[in-house]
């Protein structure tokens, strides 16, 4: 193919993919099957790989992410990101309307929109291309999260139609509730804790370092505010409608996500409608936003220090329902933490039937004096699990008695303990309390830990019930003779299970350490510990001080580790796992060739860097095919310049025409 034909083909494919993407993610109207879409994408990717000179950073192939942001740069907002003044009742809205009318001296047109409960984002576009996406931060400056935002399919990378040259659009990024519950189910299966609420989860996702992970998370976004010097219209509704034609997902009138209201009654109508219907949405909203539509009037009204005078948010009350508390039961988690649970007379709340609610801990029960048999108020706030927030004392029966919080574990009858400063009670019998053992085993076999194929939560339950496994070590003693007689255990699944157990002996040390399930030792902490101490013996023998000297290991984690290893049963368990052949030491891997992106290039590294030591950078260069030299010459390709680099080096590089790279540029090249 001629180069000009290649370019044409790339452009055609990109355009077609963009259109299908728009149809699917913005118009909810798929015009092609997933398979066909993937095939087109693959074709484009192959062409881009072959002709990198035509690869575009805003190509549809870039939606899958891949770039790593080590540190999010701080960016000052061109227009500060203000908040909205809130109101909780209709009188305040009426007062707002009266104030605005008085100043306008005439009838005012308002827009009504949903108040999305997500993470605010400001995205700027230059010449129709996504330029930068910045979080709200403190309102005057936020974090540059462009690489992550580019993976969100409903946010266009390239605009169409008649857009201004330079403008910003703001909106809210959120987890669609369906995606959020899917994510939680997956996390649970893999032994991770469930995430409590979609807003925090979205915020956490946007700040992830690996954009590939963000791409897999399927975040959603609505855009609700266009800012710039050369906008086509003088009203909010017209500019939003125009933004839709440029390719943005904006709230539309036909779905009742947006309305133009000419009176306070019409505003109330919109509020009433969504107060009832909000639970049908696949995302969370916490109110309605009312804005003056006309820009001239907006300008006249101006801003207070914190918020515009031309807009107001009406916040919905968290929904509550009253029902009878039949019984308080207690759950024992994998780490032994006790959670009191309210078992309720089923009641309809925020669109779902609620039978159970959280009671948090003993203090909460005491503070609210919650008793079995009480009529209680249940609330669904930002959290997914409803909570008991109050008691209807007037309805309390005269023979009711105060709740006596359990003192012994409901599962193994061990006396509970309470660590000073913590609200939760714990069952300390971590080695023998059934839900703790089963929970620990499920965590141990999960994908991010030992990843044992052929073993799932149900099998663990079964093996435990018949007495074949009492702790994780027992998994390594299982034989085909043990397993074959069990229900649902055919030859093939038995072989699969045994092979999975055997293979797990090759899992690297840091994952074994994570898999053991020590409190507060998650994946990242396990990695840090393994990297620092190199072996389980060194960790077992490390003092509290040695532990807190490790990067990111604080008092809480060090204390938990000390406590864990002080327990003889735990030390015995680790010894047995070692005997069985599990990896209890870090493998020393020589830095091997990882890519050849720097093939044939010579580097001089100078100065102080943010994320690397100088030696680390040199290793990275070599691992990617480059060569390090000590001083700059004509032959040097790059001067990798950190902070505090001497001016002489810079001058020399400039005079010889050597390219000077910053750390960020270097990492960009690397990825
Ligand atoms: S307009 C100057 N419209 O609520 C006002 N904000 O509490 C610009 N929000 O920072 C914001 N839905 O993050 C606007 N339809 C909507 C909104 C909305 C949610 C968020 C936004 C803002 C916060 C204020």
Image: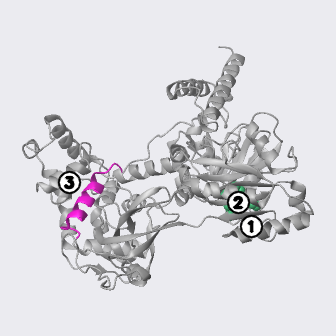
Kindly tell me whether residue 473 is visible in this rendering: yes
Q: Secondary structure at mark 2?
A: helix
Q: Is residue 98 left or right of residue 603?
A: right
Give yes or no for contact between labels 3 and 2 (Cβ–Cβ under 8 Å).
no
Q: Report x, y in % for residue 301.
A: 87, 65
Q: Quadrant of residue 152?
A: top right
Q: In the picture shown, does residue 492 fall above or below 33?
A: below
The x, y position of residue 302, in whole percent, is 86, 65
- Residue at which label 2 appears: 268
Question: Which residue occupies 34% across, 82% down?
Answer: 397
- Secondary structure mostly seen in the magenta stretch: helix
279 or 636, which is in the foreground?
Answer: 279
Q: Which residue is mark 1?
A: 93
Sequence-earlier tag: 3 or 1: 1
Q: Nearer the viewer, residue 574 or 97?
A: 97
Is 250 left, or right, of 489 in this rendering?
right
């Amino acid at each position: 193919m001629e180069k000009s034909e290649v370019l044409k083909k790339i452009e055609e494919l990109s355009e077609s993919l963009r259109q299908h993407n728009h149809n699917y993610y913005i118009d909810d109207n798929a015009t092609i099957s997933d398979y066909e879409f993937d095939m087109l994408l693959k074709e484009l990717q192959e062409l881009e790989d072959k002709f990198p000179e035509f690869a575009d950073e805003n190509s549809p192939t870039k939606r899958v992410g891949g770039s790593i942001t080590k540190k999010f740069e701080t960016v000052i907002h061109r227009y500060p990101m203000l908040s909205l003044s809130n109101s909780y009742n209709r009188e305040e809205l009426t007062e707002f309307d009266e104030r605005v009318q008085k100043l306008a001296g005439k009838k005012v047109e308002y827009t009504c929109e949903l108040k999305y409960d997500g993470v605010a984002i400001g995205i700027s576009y230059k010449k129709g291309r996504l330029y930068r996406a910045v979080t709200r931060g403190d309102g005057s400056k936020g974090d540059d999260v462009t690489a992550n935002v580019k993976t969100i399919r409903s946010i266009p990378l390239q605009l169409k139609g008649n857009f201004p040259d330079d403008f910003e659009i703001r909106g809210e990024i959120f987890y669609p509730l369906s995606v959020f519950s899917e994510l939680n189910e997956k996390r649970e299966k893999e032994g991770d804790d469930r995430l409590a609420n979609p807003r925090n989860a979205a915020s956490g996702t946007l700040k992830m370092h690996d954009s590939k992970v963000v791409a897999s998370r399927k975040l959603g976004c609505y855009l609700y505010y266009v800012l710039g010097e050369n906008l086509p219209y003088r009203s909010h509704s017209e500019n939003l409608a125009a933004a839709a034609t440029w390719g943005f997902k904006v709230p539309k009138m036909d779905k009742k996500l947006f309305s133009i209201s000419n009176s306070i009654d019409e505003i109330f109508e919109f509020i009433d409608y969504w107060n009832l219907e909000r639970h049908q949405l696949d995302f969370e909203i916490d109110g309605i936003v009312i804005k003056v539509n006309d820009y001239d009037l907006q300008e006249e009204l101006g801003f207070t220090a914190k918020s515009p005078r031309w807009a107001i948010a009406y916040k919905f009350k968290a929904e509550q329902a009253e029902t009878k508390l039949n019984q308080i039961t207690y759950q024992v988690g994998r780490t032994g933490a006790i959670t009191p649970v309210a078992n309720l007379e089923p009641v309809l709340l925020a669109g779902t039937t609620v039978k159970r609610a959280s009671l948090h801990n003993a203090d909460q029960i005491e503070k609210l004096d919650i008793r079995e048999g009480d009529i209680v108020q249940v609330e669904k706030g930002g959290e997914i699990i409803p909570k008991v927030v109050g008691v209807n004392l007037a309805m309390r029966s005269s023979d009711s008695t105060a709740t006596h919080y359990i003192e012994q574990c409901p599962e193994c009858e061990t006396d509970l303990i309470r660590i000073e400063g913590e609200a939760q009670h714990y069952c300390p019998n971590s080695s023998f309390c059934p839900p703790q053992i089963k929970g620990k085993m499920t965590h141990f076999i999960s994908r991010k830990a030992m990843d044992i194929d052929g073993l799932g939560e149900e099998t663990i339950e079964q093996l435990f019930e018949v007495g074949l496994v009492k702790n994780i070590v027992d998994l390594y003693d299982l034989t085909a003779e043990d397993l074959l007689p069990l229900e649902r255990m055919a030859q093939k699944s038995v072989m699969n299970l045994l092979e999975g157990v055997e293979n797990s002996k090759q899992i690297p040390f840091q994952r074994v350490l994570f898999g053991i399930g020590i409190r507060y030792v998650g994946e990242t902490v396990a990695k840090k510990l393994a990297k620092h101490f190199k072996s389980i013996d060194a960790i077992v023998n490390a003092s509290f001080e040695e532990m807190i000297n490790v990067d990111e290991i604080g008092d809480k984690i060090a204390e938990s580790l000390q406590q864990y290893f002080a327990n003889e049963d735990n030390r015995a368990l680790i010894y047995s796992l070692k005997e069985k052949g599990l990896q209890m030491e870090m493998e020393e891997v020589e830095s091997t060739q990882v890519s050849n992106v720097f093939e044939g290039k010579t580097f001089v590294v100078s100065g102080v860097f943010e994320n690397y030591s100088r030696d680390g950078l040199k290793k990275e260069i070599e691992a990617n095919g480059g060569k390090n030299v000590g001083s700059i010459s004509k032959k040097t390709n790059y001067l990798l310049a950190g902070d505090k680099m001497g001016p002489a080096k810079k001058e020399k590089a400039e005079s010889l025409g050597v390219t000077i790279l910053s750390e960020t540029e270097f990492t960009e090249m690397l990825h």
